[in-house]
Image (spheres, grey):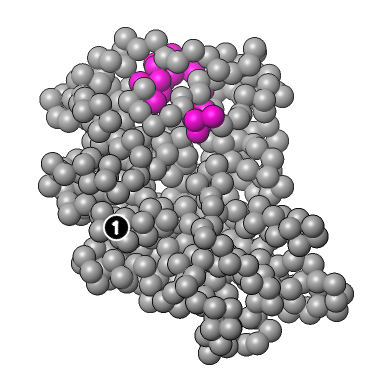
Amino acid sequence: MLYERWRKIAGERRNELALRDAASGRSWTFAELLAAGESWKGAPDTAPAGSCDIAMPQGHSPEFILDLLAAWRENKIVCPLEAGQGGAGVLASRPVNSLVPPIVHLKSTSATGGTARFVAFTAEQLMADAENIVATMGLRPDWPNLGVISMAHSYGFSNLVLPLLLHGIPLILAPAPLPEIIRRAAENEPAVTLAAVPAMWRAWHATDAIPAGVRLAISASAPLPVNLEQEIFKSRGLKIHNFLGSSECGGIAYDAGATPRTDAAFAGAPMQSVNLSLNDSGCLVVRSRAVAETYWPEKSDSLGGGIFSTSDLAELKEGAVFLRGRLGDQINVAGRKLSPETVERALLAHPQVRECLVFGVPDRDAERTEIIVAVIVAGATEMELKQFLLRTLPAWQVPREWHFVKSLSVNARGKISRREWRQRFVKETHA
């Protein structure tokens, strides 16, 4: 089904640009990419014995696209992986025949405890996600996607790869998100769509590297600070559109507004053909044709039947989604529950705070249960930040422990892990 759809798109746009690799300067029309995919043998199987029907395209190059097309053509299950990412070990833990049609795709994700697992999709579910994204965001063939985010990650696969192959949205691959590379990759393009993560937008803004041709700017994978969004709009007139998605269901909500947000909790309106509600715990429940079939190897009651129950605490108001934190991240301070995002949003409103992460750790005083810790990248002092927070937050919500760092490093999936930073802090404190 996917390969047939690709052949149809390639036939309709035969002589138009499909793919350009900024690293090598080579370009392919849709007809040329179709011909290359027809003859491409695909990467050598990297799956363990017994899993040879699972293809694992990797990297950030045209070969990723060609490996994917070869897998579609040969009716293999596709499991994209980051360069150097593990996954074969988990695949080896279950025989491949435990994955049966109509499953065609696996997305790598992590369970609550950090153990690798996969999300299984049918072709219809992948196609529904691509359709929702293209229609909701208004992706256009005359505005090529400038590809800087990982194509193996759910965000990049849904926003870059599927729009190219299933909807004819051209893709320009940049080898790295470095400012000078981004400038060169986009310098001859009058109009591009640029999907990125907040850390990239901050770096490009600081170095004045956002290409002049960006017509549609998208940010996802982590919260985009409101002050950064407002600064970019003020200096360049460019609106960064917040996108909320998940590996389990693709796009959830999108901020299509023309002006910057004033409320950091605002995540946008539901994506086209996506229905949202709240469960008894106040967490977001997603219903759509793009929701994955199941987790694999182990199933979960939170996913299946077109429904994904998230752990995102949310508020639905007047057709808009407002995020209120995650159920498992809540901090218990003397019996009072606090979402770390509440403190993070308040901190990010300070002009000298570039990045921050807040979490709870066990307190020696059992009556308090947990204390609030803030990991900060900022030019302000602890006392200045405490006084700033006290203007908008009650005293019990102000962090008791402050850890100043040069940067908040991301994990292998390009995200800042609250769990990993909490573990690091506890280990260093005990040491």
Residue 157 horizontal/vertical position (percent):
41, 38
Residue range (magenta): 64-84
**Amino acid at circle 1:** Thr
Determine whether 305 is above or below 279 in the image.
above
Q: Nearer the viewer, residue 20 or 29?
A: 20
Q: Is residue 359 left or right of residue 256?
A: right
Determine whether 408 is above or below 48 in the image.
below
286 inside magenta stretch: no
Element type where label 1 sits in the image:
loop
Q: Can residue 148 be seen in this view?
A: yes
Q: In which quarter of the image is the N terminus?
A: top left
Q: In this view, does 18 lie to the left or right of 334?
A: left
Q: In this view, does 319 lie to the left or right of 171?
A: right
Residue 431 horizontal/vertical position (percent):
79, 57
Residue receiving disc 1: 207
Displayed quadrant of residue 52 = top right
81 inside magenta stretch: yes
